[in-house]
Amino acid sequence: MAVKPIKVSQLNNYIKRILQTDPILGNISVTGEISNFRKPGRNAHAYFSLKDQTSSVRCFLSGDKYACLDFELEEGMEVIVHGFIYLHIPNGQYSINISVIEAAGQGDLAAAFAQLKAKLAAEGLFDQKYKKAIPGFPHKVAVVTSASGAAVRDIQKIIRQKNDYVDILIYPVLVQGVNAAGEISAAIDDLNENHKDVDVMIVGRGGGSAEDLWAFNEEIVARSIFRSQIPVISAVGHETDFTIADFVADLRAETPTAAADKAVPDTFLMREYLAELQIEMKRNLRMVMEDRRKALALCDPHSFGRDIQSRIAMEQMRAETLRAEMEKQVAGKVSECRHRLALLKETLDGADPKRILQKGYSVVTDETGHIVKDASLLKCDQMIKIEAAAGFAEARVTKAGKER
C-alpha cells in the first residue's frame, strides 16, 4: 500500500526536527578550509563554505559573533568551527550554524610559543644583562631576510634616506616554511664567523599570519641570536606581533622600517648640526681673538704708562674724597663733644655749693666739723661755726629747739 504523499515543506520540517533532536548534530566541531568567502559589511552575517579534499558544507556566522572575532577570516584559511546543524526550510539546504570559530592549529602554536618562551627565560636568554648596545655609528649593517620581500626594500630605502656612509650587506634567507628557521640560524652564525666587519645585524621579515612568522619562534633561531657577538635588531611583522626572536634580540623594532631607522644615525642631520657647530665655533673664536688683541694692546709700554697714570689719578681723587669726608666727620664729632661739654659745665656750675652760699645761704658746723642739719639737736653753750659766701664766724648757742 503506497504512503500518502506529503508536501515538500512538511518533509523539510520533519527532517529539521530530526536534525535538531540529534545529540551529535546539535553540538559538533568541524575542521576545514574556508571557501567562497566574501567579507560582509558592518554588522552583517558571514556566509561561506567549509571544505576538505572531497566535500563541502555551507556555514553561517551571525553578525555579532563575526564582529567579536580577534582575527580576520580569509579565503583558504584552515579553521575549526563549533555549532549545530540547521536546515533552511525554503530551499531544503542544511548548514552549520556557527557559535565559535578558531584558526586551526592556533591553540597548538600558542602552547608551543609559551612553552619555549618559559624554557628560554629560565635559562636567562632574555636577561637584560646579556643585551649588547647598538653601535651609534655603524660602518656596515647586515640584513637577514627574504631577498624578494617588501621588508628588504623598505630597510634599504630608509637607511639610504638617512645615511650615505654605511654599507649594507643583504643576506638572503627563507623567512617562512619548514627550512626557514635553519637558514636564518645559519645566516646569523655565518655573519659572526666570516663577516667580522659587520657592526649590527637586522633579522626579520614583513607581516603575516602566526604560521608565516613561526620561523622566528624556533629555538634554533633564538640560540643563534643569543650567541651572536654582533648586536641583533629583531624586526618581525607588525607592531602587535611578538616572537621569541624579539625577546632574545639586543633590540626589538616594531617593524622592518623601524629597525632600519634605529640601526643607523641620520648623517644628513649630523652634517647640518656640524655646520651650525662650525659657525658657532668660528664666532666664539673671533670673540676670543678680539679679547686677546685688546689684552695684547694693553701690554704696549706707552699704553701701559697711560693706564698707570690714569689709575694713579683716579686713586688720588679717591684719596682726596676720603680725606675730605674724614675731616667733615671729625669736625662734626668735635662740635658734638663741645656742645655736650658746655651742657655738663652748666650742670656742674648749678650744683656748686659756693654759688648757693652767694645767694645768702650759710653752712653751720659743730665742734667736730659736721654740718648741722637739725638745730634742735644743738645744746646751750655749744660752740658752732658759721661759714658764709665770704668769711666765717663762731658763735655760742643760747637757745635751741624745734621750729615754731
Image (cartoon, rainbow, N blue to C red):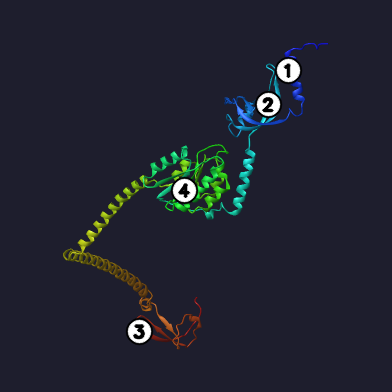
Label 4: state its secondary structure: strand
Real-space CA distance between mark 2 and mark 1, rounded to the nearest whole angstrom: 17 Å
Label drawn at residue 219 = none
Q: Foreground residue, 385 or 230?
A: 230
Query: N-terminal of the two: label 1 or label 4?
Result: 1
Displayed quadrant of residue 347? bottom left
* Among numbered discs 2 and 1, the one appearing first in the sequence: 1
Of marks 3 and 2, which one's residue comes earlier in the chain?
A: 2
Which quarter of the figure has residue 299?
bottom left
Q: Is residue 373 visible?
A: yes
Identified by mark 3, the residue type is: Gly
Marks 1 and 3, how far apart in space? 169 Å
Number of the front mark, 1 or 3:
1
For discs 3 and 2, the disc positioned in front in the rendered view:
2
Which class describes the residues within 10 Å of circle 4: few (<14), some (14-19), or many (20+)?
many
Q: At label 2, which amino acid type do we have?
A: Asn
Q: How many marks?
A: 4
**Three-letter amino acid code at the position of disc 4:** Met
Of tags 4 and 3, which is closer to the observer?
4
Please rate how many residues cluster around mark 1, counting C-alpha atoms within 10 Å: few if below 14, some from 14 to 19, many from 20: some
Residue 230 appears in the rendering: no
Residue wearing tag 2 = 97
Check disc 4 and report the residue beneath it: 201
Q: Residue 12 bears which disc, if any? A: 1
The answer to whether 71 appears left or right of 355 in the picture is right
At numbered mark 1, what does the secondary structure look like: helix, strand or loop? Answer: helix
Per the image, the residue denoted by label 3 is: 391
Q: CA distance from mark 4 to mark 3?
A: 131 Å
